[in-house]
Image (tube, rainbow, N blue to C red):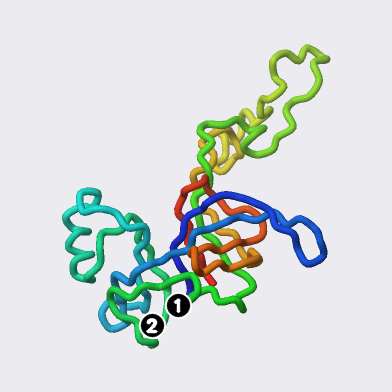
Amino acid sequence: MPGLIGKKIGMTSVFGADGKVIPCTVIEAGPCVVTQLRTVENDGYAAVQLAYDETTEKHASKALQGHFKKAGVNPQRKLAEFAADFAQELKLGDVLTVADIFPEGVSFVDVVGTSKGKGFQGVVKRHGFAGVGGQTHGQHNRLRHPGSMGASSWPSRVFPGMRMAGHMGNERVKVFNLKVVKVIPENNLLVVKGSVPGAKGSYLMLEA
C-alpha cells in the first residue's frame, strides 16, 4: 500500500538529537477503510480506493450511500485512489492505520494537498514583481503595477502565459520527501519536518 488519507492538525516544534529545534507539521493519518479495489481486468489499471473521516448518511449522496453499503462501511467524507498492486490480501472494508503504512522505518513521505486560497492578487504578491520603483521622472501611483506587457504594432496583443494579476492559491500542491520525525500510532498521528499545503483541518494525501 502506498499511502493514506489524512487531515492537517497544525504545526509544532520538537527538539532533534543535536538539540536544535525542528519545525514540524502534525497530521492525522487515517484510519482509512477500503471501499473499492480496481483491477487491470475490469478497470484497465490497478488501484485501491480509500475513504476517510466517517460521517452520517444524510451528508452522503444516494449514489455514495450505495457505494459505501456495497463495501460494507459507514459513509465517509473523503475518497481517494492510490495506484497499487494489492496482491496482498486486501478486501472491501479493511481498515488501514498509520502503523500499517508508515512504520518506524519509513524516513520520508510525499504530501498532496490544496493550498490556501488568496483570492485575486496583483503581480507583486502573486509573482514577486518588484514594482516600478521610485517616484521620480513623473512616476505616480505605479509602485505595484506590472509595467509593460508587450509591443504595440506587433503583435498588437499580449502573449498567452504572461505573468499578470489573477487568482492565487487554492491549487493542488505536492511536496516531496518530507522527513518523518515521529509516528504516534495510538493517536493515528504522523509528525513530519517542515510545512505542508493547506489550512488546518484540510484533507491531505500521504504517499510513502
Q: Nearer the viewer, residue 44 or 69?
A: 69
Q: Is residue 10 above or below residue 91?
A: above
Describe the element under mark 1 as helix, strand or loop.
Answer: loop
Q: Nearer the viewer, residue 49 or 93?
A: 93
Question: Residue 86: which numbered mark, if any?
Answer: 2
Which of the 4 image quarters holds residue 30? bottom left
What residue is at 76 percent from the left and 55 percent from the top?
21
The amino acid type of the residue labelled 2 equals Phe
Are the residues tagged 1 and 2 within 8 Å (C-beta)? yes
Characterize the local packing of mark 1: few (<14), some (14-19) or many (20 or more) Cα atoms within 10 angstroms.
some
Q: Whole-percent x and y of residue 108?
A: 62, 70
Report the side of 49 relative to 61 (left or right): right
Describe the element under mark 2 as helix, strand or loop.
Answer: loop
Q: Whole-percent x and y of residue 19?
A: 81, 61
The amino acid type of the residue labelled 1 equals Met
Report the side of 27 relative to 135 (left or right): left
The CA distance from mark 1 to mark 2 is 7 Å
Q: Quadrant of the C terminus?
A: bottom right
Q: Quadrant of the N terminus?
A: bottom left
> On the image, numbered disc 1 is attached to which residue?
1
